[in-house]
Image (cartoon, rainbow, N blue to C red):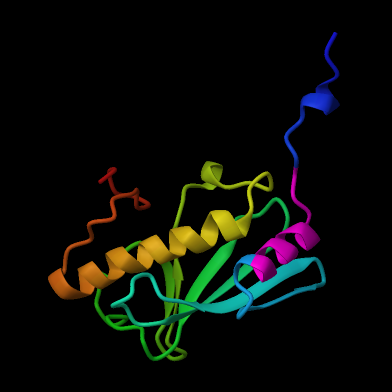
Amino acid sequence: MANKAFNAPHRYRLIDQQMALMQAYPDGNCYIHHGVLHWEGNIQPTALSRRYSIVVTYRMRMRPIVMLQGDNLQGLDRPDFPHRFSIDRENNRVSICLHLPHEFDSTQLISETIIPWAAEWLCFYEIWLATGEWCGGGKHPGKPAE
């Protein structure tokens, strides 16, 4: 009989996530405080794109919270601002929606999933700014799948 623990997927601890983020994004700032991983850095989705400030907070067994912030964000006052959870216009921040709850768990590295997904989201965001159309697909709460 097979040992279930032997076949269980590897779950990354917060320190593992921190080390992977620091290795993949050495210019970012990453620390763990009171059981929560915090990463802040800048990403540029394409060579022609602006650089965007991104903040990721992650607690084990919870969905990572991904915030974009700063003066490079545009369109926060538009009612059709896409694929987001919340907007903080006063502080020029937006919490973005990158995935469904079952698409990320602790068997995955944030550096290999969440950050690249945020870069892809930013590509679609820049297209949305130029055209007014969200081309990134996805599901929105209370709306049918796109």
Q: Position of residue 44 (x, y in %)?
A: 41, 75
Q: Residue at x 38, y 61 (%)?
A: 120
**Quarter location, residue 25:** bottom right
- Compared with residue 56, is residue 14 higher up or lower down, i.e. above or below? above
Q: Position of residue 112 (x, y in %)?
A: 56, 55
**In this image, 130 relative to 143: left or right?**
left
Question: Measuring 46% from the left and 83% from the top, which residue is drawn there?
Answer: 69
- The residue sitting at 64% across, 73% down in the picture is 39
Give the residue displayed 47% in from the left and 90% down from the top: 91
Residue 11 can be seen in this image: yes
Q: Is residue 38 above or below residue 61?
A: below
Residue 136 placement (x, y as % from top left): 28, 55
Give the side of residue 102 with respect to residue 38, left or right.
left
Q: Tell me the chief SS of the magenta region.
A: helix
Quadrant, the N terminus: top right
Nearer-the-camera pick, 70 or 115: 115
119 or 103: nearer the viewer: 119
Residue that extends furthest to the left in the rendered view of this protein: 131
Q: Nearer the viewer, residue 70 or 77?
A: 70
Q: Quadrant of residue 81?
A: bottom left
**How far from the left and from the top, in percent, is residue 31?**
75, 75
The segment highlighted magenta reads: 11-23
